[in-house]
Image (cartoon, rainbow, N blue to C red):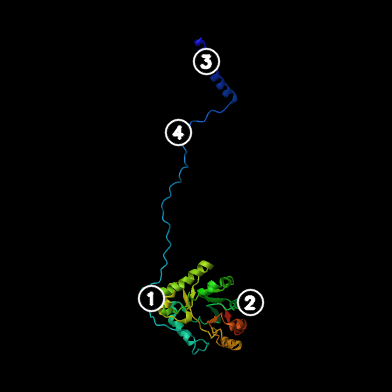
């Protein structure tokens, strides 16, 4: 009897196993996934993309170094300071003897006190700060189709970027009048170079404009500072006409200013005018007309 029960049990187990396999084949159930690696079956290895070909380690081409100032050589030049004011006697062409003398003496340093003999006048404006007259001056220059050269300080550039951009947009020359408007012969050579280049770099970086003309504050210079500016890629611009227009509380009468501007006209004149002058803003248009009537023309100051 026990043997019979055992036989029935074996038969039932076999039937159940056969039934499970058959039902799996009929239902098309997918085969079980492979066992994880923890159970002794390794996963398919992950293949990383092939690395790019090795690049040759070729150093980037270095730009040619730009020579800086030779401070040792410059320091051996004459350090005696000179102030500049173009007054004194004039020649038969109404040109200042002082301007002609200094032009000959310092031309080797790319210094310009007066331009060559021609019926051309160059208008330049010093921009130390703003009193509201620069836009009027720019309006007049645009109306008369006359280019100007604007000598800027850092204070003006930072305070009035809109006017600086307008000067660029309307075709005028931007020029360097120093960062801090200090007396250059009293400064160290390295300090003077730093002063010039601070403003140079600021205008280049913020306006995309490279300046190449420099005017010394107060017109004070010596051979060392002239050579320093030349080594920095600058030409030094002085003037052959100026008048007392910078005293904002003591402005000349318009009739006096016009007479002075017209009667002093001469070939190759470099006019220095200050944009803080109310009188200049009032007489500029008429002065341009009268100078043209005398046979002069105006040109962009490019040296």
Q: How crowded is the residue under tag 1: few (<14 C-alpha within 10 Å), some, or many (20+)?
A: some
**Tag nearer the camera, 3 or 1:** 3
SS of the residue under disc 4: helix
**In the image shown, does 211 or 136 lie closer to the viewer?**
136
Distance between the alpha carbons at the discs numbered 3 and 2: 118 Å
Where is residue 268 shown, x and y percent of the image? 53, 82
Where is residue 101 shown, x and y percent of the image? 45, 85
Are circles 2 and 1 on residues that touch, CB within 8 Å? no
**Tag nearer the camera, 3 or 2:** 3
Tell me which label, 2 or 1, sits earlier in the chain. Answer: 1
Q: Which mark is residue 74?
A: 1
Tell me the quarter of the picture where residue 262 sits: bottom right
| Depicted 252 relative to depicted 76: above or below | below
| Residue matched to label 4 | 38
| Residue matched to label 2 | 143
Tell me which label, 3 or 2, sits earlier in the chain. Answer: 3
SS of the residue under disc 3: helix
**Tag nearer the camera, 4 or 2:** 4
Q: Which mark is residue 9?
A: 3
Q: Which mark is residue 277?
A: none
Tell me which label, 3 or 1, sits earlier in the chain. Answer: 3
Q: Is residue 301 left or right of residue 145?
A: left
Residue at coordinates 55% horizontally, 19% vertically from top-left?
16
SS of the residue under disc 2: helix
Tell me which label, 4 or 3, sits earlier in the chain. Answer: 3
């Amino acid at each position: 009897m026990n043997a019979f029960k055992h036989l029935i049990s074996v038969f039932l187990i076999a039937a159940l196993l056969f039934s499970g396999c058959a039902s799996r084949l009929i239902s098309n159930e997918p085969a079980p996934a492979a066992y994880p690696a923890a159970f002794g079956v390794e996963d398919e290895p992950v293949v990383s993309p092939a690395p790019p070909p090795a690049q040759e380690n070729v150093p980037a081409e270095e730009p040619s170094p730009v020579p800086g100032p030779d401070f040792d050589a410059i320091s051996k030049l004459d350090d005696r300071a000179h102030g500049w004011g173009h007054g004194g006697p004039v020649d038969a062409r109404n040109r200042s003897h002082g301007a002609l003398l200094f032009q000959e003496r310092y031309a080797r340093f790319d210094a310009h006190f007066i331009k060559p003999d021609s019926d051309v006048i160059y208008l330049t404006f010093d921009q130390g700060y703003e009193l509201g007259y620069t836009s009027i001056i720019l309006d007049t220059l645009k109306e008369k189709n006359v280019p100007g050269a604007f000598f800027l300080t850092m204070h003006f550039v930072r305070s009035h970027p809109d006017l600086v951009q307008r000067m660029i947009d309307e075709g005028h020359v931007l020029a360097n009048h120093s960062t801090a408007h200090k007396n250059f012969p009293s400064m160290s050579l390295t300090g003077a170079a730093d002063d010039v280049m601070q403003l140079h770099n600021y205008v280049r970086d913020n306006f995309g404009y490279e300046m190449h003309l420099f005017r010394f504050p107060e017109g004070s210079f010596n051979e060392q500072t002239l050579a320093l500016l030349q080594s920095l890629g600058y030409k030094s611009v002085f003037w052959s006409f100026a008048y007392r227009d910078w005293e904002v509380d003591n402005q000349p009468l318009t009739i006096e200013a016009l007479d002075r501007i017209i009667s002093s006209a001469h070939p190759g004149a470099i006019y220095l005018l200050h944009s803080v002058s109310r009188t200049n803003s009032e007489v500029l248009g008429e002065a341009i007309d009268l100078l043209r009537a005398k046979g002069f023309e105006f040109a962009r100051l490019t040296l």
